[in-house]
Image (cartoon, rainbow, N blue to C red):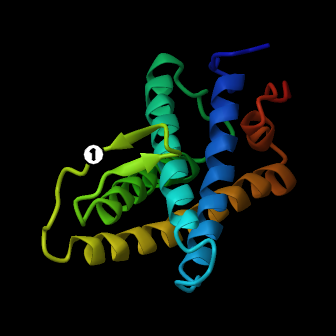
Amino acid sequence: MLLQNTSKQFGHVSVLIHWLIALAVYGMFILGLWMVTLSYYDSWYHRAPELHKSIGFLIFIVMIIRVIWRFISPPPKPLSSYSQLTRISAKLAHFTLFIALFGILFSGYFISTADGQSISVFGWFEIPATLVKQGVQADTAGIIHLYLAWLLVILSLLHGLAALKHHFIDRDSTLKRMFGFPPDTK
């Protein structure tokens, strides 16, 4: 089992973190869209946001690990078949995905703590509120949270389409590498 990345392929740790975050992001997006439709008398009216906040904190921890892991185990080099535009686009897309995700996590924190209440993470521990009573903090953070969530989902869909394009049209190893398989040796 290959744990660390090599110059040619992603290791299993990077692959696991990548797909875990992808699934969590889509799950949280769906949960977020669903929970804003709930009425006050719905049994999930309070439970869904608590679940959303708790999972959001876990995503934050995994993202910190992911950033640290990128320094410990740098990603593979781009395939030699990539054009300069592809290389720049990929770097820009990855950077934007990271920034958007961290932006969503921080704005979610600012929404949740705007009233001075801490965030309970599955009842295990509390994350204290830091910036509170900043006027329209919850509203501003809510707008940022919403737009960044849509940006993240749209950009990640484009990311996935680009991987499929590489696999089916370019017939290169990009998608295989994203699943932890070694590149073709053509």
User: Which residue does the numbered mark 1 point to in the structure image?
Assistant: 128
- Viewer-proximal residue, 154 or 51? 51
Q: Is residue 104 above or below residue 1?
A: below
Number of labels in the image equals 1
Q: Secondary structure at mark 1?
A: loop
Q: Residue at x 79, y 38 (%)?
A: 173
**86 up-or-down from 134: above or below:** above
Which residue occupies the foreground of this view, 43 or 111?
Answer: 43
Q: In the displayed structure, does residue 161 sit left or right of residue 86?
A: right
| Coordinates of residue 157 in the picture (x, y in percent) | 66, 64
Q: Amino acid at mark 1?
A: Pro
Q: Position of residue 105 (x, y in %)?
A: 41, 54
Q: Is residue 180 above or below residue 120?
A: above
Quadrant including the C terminus: top right
Q: Nearer the viewer, residue 158 or 14?
A: 14
Does the rendering let one see residue 46?
Answer: yes
Disc 1 crowd rating (10 Å Cα; few below 14, some 14-19, many 20+) is: few
In the displayed orientation, state which residue is furthest to the left: 134
Q: Quadrant of the rendered structure where residue 133 is? A: bottom left
Q: Is residue 20 left or right of residue 97?
A: right
Residue 115 lies, in percent from the top left, at 24, 66
Note whether residue 82 is visible. no
Q: Quadrant of the N terminus?
A: top right
Q: Position of residue 78 (x, y in %)?
A: 61, 34
Question: Residue at the spot x=65%, y=69% of the render?
Answer: 30
Closest to the observer, 15 or 56: 56
For image coordinates 31% across by 51% down, the residue present is: 118
Does residue 93 lie above or below 67 as drawn? below
